[in-house]
Amino acid sequence: MRFRRQPVSLQVQLARKWINAASRVVGFTGAGISTESGVSDFRSPNGVWARNRAVYYQEFISNEEDRIEAWRQKVESWPEMRDAKPNSGHMALVELYRAGKLSAMITQNIERLHQRSGIPSEIVFELHGTTTEAMCLTCGDRIDMEEAVARVEGGEKAPLCRKCGGLLKPATVSFGQPMPVRVVLAAQQAAESCDLFLAVGSSLVVQPAASLPVIAKNAGAKLIIVNREETPVDSVADLVLHGEIGDILPVMVGMASAGETA
């Protein structure tokens, strides 16, 4: 039985009941939660890719002009990412963690707002990497993005690693770049072992991330989706809530983490 057409208040009550009954909740977030912190998304008509050309991984590693363009875009977007603050949606997920229910926090987002909100890095799985660091593609050394941006602004249009001379790249996963295998496997294992999967703010169209809610559902978990718009996975979810994440999630999660029974 599905519960997508009930009034939102009844949907929230049902979500609270399921969260209270769950012992291993996996959170999953996409750009929709971060846009409420002022972070631009990538795929909307006014998003990042509407304003900039995507630099593919192979282009980055083979062409200096493409590296320069990628770093130009990073310098332009960095203040927005750096200055973003966790919002009420992020803090609702922190409440789940404090209640001892959140076993893993899987995210497609790159600005580390979950870690900044108080969720330990050990349980945050960043499917698309992070924009807060730059990584050498040769030796793997990492530096803070603030340092990398300062070097670009200081005249290094496509900075190199100061340890080995290799290409320095933002530690995000570019188009055409292999996904971080260990992170993906850990996320899949978390999805397979949870009893409730909470997907928040994701269009659920980008693979392999979009398969994780289905993996959890097929393994027996309840699947709740909270998003402003419909997703391709709504049809298999147990509960779908449409609206502003910062309004819905604190009510749905905050009371549950306080031990309310339904």
Image (tube, rainbow, N blue to C red):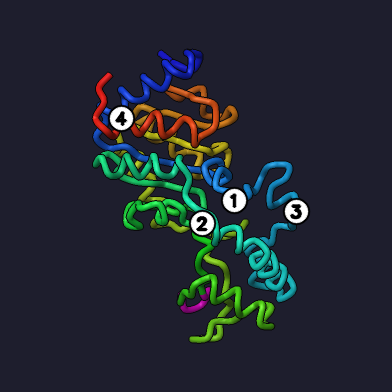
Helix, strand or loop for the magenta stretch, by majority: loop
Name the residue carrying label 1: 39
Q: Which residues are magenta?
A: 136-140
- Decide: marks 2, 1 in contact (CB < 8 A)? yes
Q: Residue at x 69, y 47 (%)?
A: 47
Instruction: Tell me the amino acid under the disc marked 1.
Output: Val
Left or right: residue 233 versus residue 12 is right
Residue 185 at least partly seen:
yes
Determine crowd level at label 3: few under 14, some 14-19, many 20+ residues with C-alpha closer than 10 A: few
Q: Residue 121, image x and y in percent? A: 35, 57
Q: Secondary structure at mark 2?
A: loop
Q: Indicate the quadrant containing the N terminus: top left, top right, bottom left or bottom right.
A: top left
Residue 220 in magenta stretch: no
Q: CA distance from mark 4 to mark 1?
A: 28 Å
Identify residue for label 4. 256
x, y percent for residue 60: 66, 69
Residue that numbered label 3 is attached to:
51
In-image side of 68 versus 113 (left or right): right
> Is label 4 or label 2 in front?
4
